[in-house]
């Protein structure tokens, strides 16, 4: 992973009383940090490395290519093309928020131009496997015959126009940093990972694997590391509707060169601290104990370094707003030691990054399994992932930061 070349990055960081000061270096003064225009080095030095499960058909994908291969719809109906710019790019995606009857963009879905349920699946949905340096080169901007599952050792030229889906350098990560501006110097760095398709966890009944459930076009996953005065304290692993948190120095936490490993589940891309099988809770499952819905991770797949194919930004919130009010963010692009600033407008998009849930009458849809359907709606973007949270965990469950990593975590 020693190969260095100029890449675009994304980080969201708050500029305030500590601003980027606490982020830049544990020894830097607040004034020096506030004046920093680049992402704090320790955010990169401690960034997770993502272990892609071997054989995963859906690898990290280019964020901009998602716009090339989808069209905006509301209620499964295409939006009149005259209502938004053409082509849609990362520089103008937020214009969809102004489409009439879209509820400020919230009702808008980026719907696949191809049949996402076809076999084999469209090439652009499969993404690009990281190469031997941990970089995702050679973005698939439209359907092609190349194999996304095969690692590429080809060193492509630097992506010259990050908002153009046709550019060759793939950008598939968003590293988001938020400064709490408190006396403790608390900073949260969010490491977002983008995949064009989520093949949900599969039902495992009596050891027989069946079809996956909860599949959807577009997939945003993330880890979050909480820092205090530049030192990592805890890490969050997102897993479907919730996740797990561990202290950064937890016993059993896998690391490589000081960077934690995030095991990406096969197809679903939920993030785990260990390899192996992981049960996924089904709210309507009637039998005590684990449900038959499982995620699977292993140590055999490619190792992805998201910092080599990402954008970095800063984010601020209105003065005087509540400490956990993450509405009305303002994003500002940052540089890294090896990159220029990326586009920002796409972060303001309020809609979903995949298709709306197809109706039960659609032949691609299957009967529900205790309330879980085969195909569900795509997710919204990073701005909706609680960037301004009080605890390491997302809300909705008790937040327990564990000191020991056990098998199955």
Image (cartoon, grey):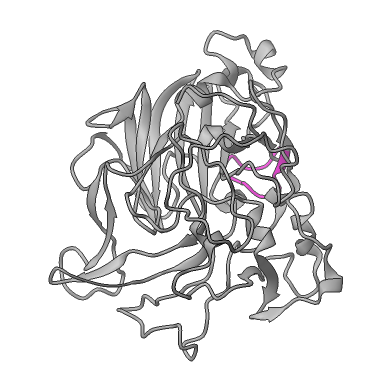
Q: Residue at x 63, y 20 (%)?
A: 337
The N terminus sits in image quarter: top left
Q: Main secondary structure of the magenta part?
A: loop
Is 295 inside the magenta-drawn segment? no
In the shown orientation, is residue 184 left or right of residue 381?
left
The C terminus sits in image quarter: top left
Based on the displayed image, in which of its 4 quarters is residue 405 positioned? Answer: top left
In the shown orientation, is residue 321 left or right of residue 151?
right
In the shown orientation, is residue 183 left or right of residue 149?
right
Magenta span of residues? 320-331
Is 328 inside the magenta-drawn segment? yes
Based on the displayed image, in which of its 4 quarters is residue 267 positioned? Answer: bottom left
Residue 313 lies, with reference to residue 201, above or below; the image says: above
Residue placed most toward the observer, 281 or 180: 281
Residue 375 lies, with reference to residue 227, above or below; the image says: below
x and y, in percent, of residue 34 in the image:
69, 18
Q: Residue at x 83, y 66 (%)?
A: 84
Residue 101 lies, with reference to residue 93, above or below; the image says: below
In the shown orientation, is residue 294 left or right of residue 139?
left
x and y, in percent, of residue 315 in the image:
67, 37
Residue 330 lies, with reference to residue 94, above or below; the image says: above
Residue placed most toward the observer, 289 or 124: 124
x and y, in percent, of residue 329 in the image:
69, 44
Q: Is residue 319 shown to the viewer in this render?
A: no
Q: Residue at x 69, y 40 (%)?
A: 317
């Amino acid at each position: 992973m020693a190969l260095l070349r100029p890449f675009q990055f994304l980080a969201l960081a708050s500029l305030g009383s500590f601003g980027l000061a606490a982020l830049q270096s544990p020894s830097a003064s607040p004034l020096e940090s506030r004046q920093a225009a680049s992402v704090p080095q320790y955010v990169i030095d401690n960034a997770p490395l993502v272990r892609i499960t071997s054989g995963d058909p859906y690898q990290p994908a280019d964020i901009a290519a998602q716009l090339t291969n989808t069209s905006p719809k509301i209620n499964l109906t295409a939006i009149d093309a005259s209502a938004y710019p053409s082509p849609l790019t990362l520089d103008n995606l937020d214009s969809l928020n102004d489409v009439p009857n879209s509820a400020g963009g919230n009702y808008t879905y980026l719907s696949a131009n191809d049949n996402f349920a076809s076999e084999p699946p469209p090439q652009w949905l499969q993404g690009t496997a990281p190469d031997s340096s941990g970089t995702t080169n050679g973005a698939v901007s439209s359907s092609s015959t190349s194999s996304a599952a095969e690692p590429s050792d080809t060193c492509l030229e630097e992506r010259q126009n990050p908002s153009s889906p046709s550019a060759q350098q793939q950008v598939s990560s968003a590293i988001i940093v938020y400064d709490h501006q408190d006396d403790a110097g608390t900073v949260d760095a969010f490491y977002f990972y983008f995949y064009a398709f989520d093949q949900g966890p599969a039902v495992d009944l009596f050891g027989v694997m069946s079809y996956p459930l909860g599949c959807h076009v577009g997939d945003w996953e993330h880890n979050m590391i909480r820092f205090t005065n530049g030192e990592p304290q805890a890490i969050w692993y997102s897993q479907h509707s919730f996740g797990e948190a561990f202290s950064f120095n937890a016993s059993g936490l896998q690391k490589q060169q000081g960077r934690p490993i995030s095991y990406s589940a096969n197809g679903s891309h939920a993030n785990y601290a260990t390899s192996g099988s992981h049960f996924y809770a089904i709210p309507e499952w009637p039998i005590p104990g684990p449900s038959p819905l499982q995620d699977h991770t292993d140590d055999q797949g490619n190792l992805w370094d998201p910092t080599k194919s990402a954008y970095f930004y800063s984010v601020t919130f209105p003065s005087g707003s509540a400490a956990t009010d993450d509405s009305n963010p303002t994003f500002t692009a940052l540089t890294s030691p090896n990159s220029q600033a990326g586009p920002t407008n796409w972060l303001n998009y309020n809609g979903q990054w995949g298709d709306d849930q197809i109706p039960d009458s659609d032949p691609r849809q299957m009967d529900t399994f205790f309330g879980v359907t085969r195909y569900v709606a795509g997710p919204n973007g990073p701005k909706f992932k609680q960037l301004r949270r009080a605890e390491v965990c997302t809300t909705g469950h008790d937040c327990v930061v564990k000191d020991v990593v056990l098998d199955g975590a």
